[in-house]
Amino acid sequence: MNLLKVLLYSLVFAGFANASEPSATSPALININTADAATLATLTGINIRKAEDIIKYREANKGFKTIDELGNIHGIGKKTLETNRARLTVGEVKTVVKPADSNVAKPVDNKPSAPSTANGLMPKM
């Protein structure tokens, strides 16, 4: 029975540890300055009519400067804004490219080399 508890706790802990990592199925960011109504309507608490209101506001105000500006639209409150914040952007989505690591092992040349001596010189043959 004790082993069963340990196993159960291990599984629960593993689930929590993986929950903080982004998954391949996590939704993509939505740029509120370029998204169409159908895309905006995928947000929690936003129906197609509210999505159209977002587009009208965007056109009237030359785009959104911040995500918080969504709160200026009638019917979008703090709760809706905070629920969707992680999925929203107002600018271009940029991919971060890390520089090549110079410590990465290089491929090994498996060609046989000529025999050498302890001092590194080639022996006379």
Image: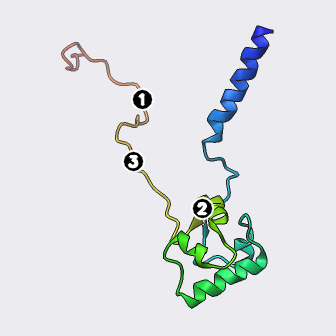
| Left or right position of 64 against 9 | left
Q: Give the label, 3 or 1, closer to the camera.
A: 3
Q: Which colour scheme is used?
A: rainbow
| Of pointers 3 and 1, the one earlier in the residue sequence | 3
| Left or right position of 95 against 116 | right
* Element marked by disc 2: helix
Out of 72 and 43, give the one closest to the viewer: 72
Q: Looking at the picture, which amino acid does disc 3 mark?
A: Ala
| Left or right position of 1 against 21 | right
Q: Which residue is drawn at 59% across and 78% down?
A: 72
Out of 107 and 16, give the one closest to the viewer: 16
Q: Looking at the picture, which amino acid does disc 1 mark?
A: Lys
| Of pointers 2 and 3, the one earlier in the residue sequence | 2
- Quarter holding the C terminus is top left
- Quarter holding the N terminus is top right
Tag 2 and tag 1, C-beta contact below 8 Å: no
Reading the image, the residue beneath label 2 is 85
Reading the image, the residue beneath label 1 is 111
| Of pointers 2 and 1, the one earlier in the residue sequence | 2
* Element marked by disc 1: loop
Reading the image, the residue beneath label 3 is 100
Q: Give the label, 2 or 3, closer to the camera.
A: 2
Give percent across and percent down for residue 124: 21, 16
Q: Residues within 10 Å of mark 2 (few under 14, many from 20)?
A: some
Q: Give the answer, above or below, for where 103 lies relative to 36.
A: above
